[in-house]
Amino acid sequence: QPQPVESGGGLVQPGGSLRLSCAVPEGTFQKYDMEWWHQAPGKQREMVASITRTGRTTEYADPVKGRFTISRDLAMNIAYLQMDLLQPDDSGFYYCNARYGPNNYWGRGTQVYVSS
């Protein structure tokens, strides 16, 4: 079973950028659809972006459209979430999910804090 590992979180000022990474240290990265989920303090986890196994199709939640970009590097087994124009509401934990059919493999998350 893959164990995604997220990194790249941290403290950033409003309007700033961060790039999150999700490494899947397992030889079949290309078979998983990849998702990024956001959990704000006291709220449910919500999906913010997804990318198909080929990378051809991406989807975004309305609050992040035009600000976040999901991508994947099949050679490096890494999925990315480029986050621009960050706002305080973007704060919280970001989780990577590797999905294959009905199976979901979650990372432990990386924390993002947007504050001046």
Image: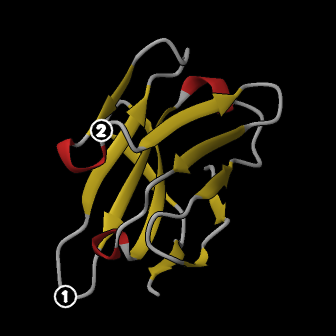
Q: Is residue 16 left or right of residue 59?
A: right
Q: Please name the residue shown 35% across and 30% down the image.
A: 101
Q: Is residue 6 left or right of residue 95?
A: right
Numbered tag placed on residue 54 in the rendering: none
Q: Position of residue 27 (x, y in %)?
A: 77, 34
Callout in the foreground (2, 1): 2
In what element is the residue under mark 2? Answer: loop
Residue at the right extreme of this rendering? 75
Quick check: can you spot residue 3?
no
The disc labelled 2 sits on which kind of residue? Answer: Lys
Q: Check disc 2 and report the residue beneath it.
A: 65
Q: Nearer the viewer, residue 79 or 2?
A: 79
Q: Quadrant of residue 16?
A: bottom right
Q: Please name the residue shown 50% across and 37% down the image.
A: 70
Quick check: can you spot residue 60?
yes
For disc 1, the neighbor class at 10 Å (few under 14, some 14 to 19, many from 20) is few
Q: Earlier in the sequence, mark 2 or mark 1?
A: 1
Q: Position of residue 55 (x, y in %)?
A: 54, 18
Q: Nearer the viewer, residue 103 or 110?
A: 110
Q: Is residue 20 left or right of residue 69?
A: right
Numbered tag placed on residue 42 in the rendering: 1
In what element is the residue under mark 1? Answer: loop
Q: Nearer the viewer, residue 5 or 113?
A: 113
Relative to 38, does residue 21 appear above or below in the rendering? above
For disc 2, the neighbor class at 10 Å (few under 14, some 14 to 19, many from 20) is few
Are dots 2 and 1 in contact, CB under 8 Å? no
Q: Please name the residue shown 27% across and 73% down the image.
A: 89
The disc labelled 1 sits on which kind of residue? Answer: Gly
Relative to 110, does residue 75 appear above or below in the rendering? above
Q: Position of residue 60 (x, y in %)?
A: 30, 36
Relative to 97, does residue 71 appear above or below in the rendering? above
Q: Please name the residue shown 37% across and 41% down the image.
A: 49
